[in-house]
Image (cartoon, grey):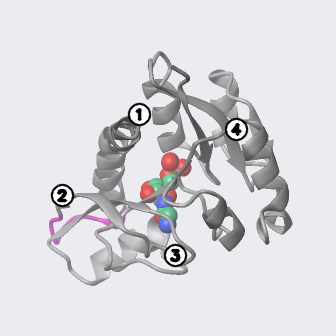
Amino acid sequence: MTKKRISIFASGGGSNAERFFEFFQNDQDIEIVSLFTNNKSAGVIERAKRFNIPYHIYNRNYWQNGEVIIDLLKSQKVDYIVLAGFMLLIPDELVSAYPDKIFNIHPALLPKFGGKGMYGMNVHKAVKEAREATSGITIHYVNEHYDEGQIISQVSCPIELSDTVEEIAKKVLALEHKNYPKVIAEVVRKSI
Ligand code: GAR
């Protein structure tokens, strides 16, 4: 049987991307075949190098209609795409080329604290300002709108009123690392 092939898209430090590189290193069913980034100075590139994952840097212009990227994904026989801190909107053409095959993680409990501009620390700041008693992660399918695709899994954690924005971020990131590769492995394995 041929393994299912995943490409990771990331724009930043890439701590989640690294969890995927590690998690699937010796997996019998699933492999990580490439990394795509829009940011030539993203920390995730060094992580990909360490794991010998081929990487591709395409600036914002290439993500307008995604044509070049779709061709490359198809030539790599990519089955699934995992967004791990990817900050641009996925073009409609790419969503249509990979229907229900693109996953994202959002660092809050959607539908709250989602949408354009809601990424990274902005999300945790908003959670703190709203004096929420819980936050957490949302793993969901990607459609043409930011953070609106069907939810696959949510995991929550308690937030104390005394928690700083950084403390909230740390709690949520720990949940991401623990759950994201595991949940994606479950979804992909079901299709085998
Ligand atoms: C993660 O917290 C992820 O949930 C968030 O960016 C961070 C990337 O961290 N994604 C979004 O906010 C998407 N709207 P990482 O580069 O260390 O994996």
Q: Where is residue 171 shown, x and y percent of the image?
A: 28, 52
Please tell me whether residue 190 belongs to the stretch shown in magenta.
no
The 10 Å Cα crowd at callout 1, few under 14, some 14 to 19, many 20 or more, is few
Q: Which mark is residue 45?
A: 4
Report the residue marked by disc 2: 157
Q: Earlier in the sequence, mark 2 or mark 4?
A: 4
Q: Residue at x 67, y 36 (%)?
A: 34
Image depth: mark 3 or mark 2 in front: 3
Mark 4 belongs to which amino acid?
Answer: Ile
Whichever of callouts 4 and 1 sits on the residue coming sooner in the sequence is: 4
- Residue at the location (31% across, 43% down)? 179
Q: Position of residue 98 (x, y in %)?
A: 60, 56
Residue type beneath disc 2:
Cys
| Callout 2 secondary element | strand
Query: Which residues fall within the magenta stretch?
Result: 159-165
Q: Nearer the viewer, mark 3 or mark 1?
A: 1
Indicate yes or no: mark 3 CB to ligand 1 under 8 Å: yes
Q: Which mark is residue 192?
A: 1
How far is the residue under mark 2 from the one under mark 4? 30 Å
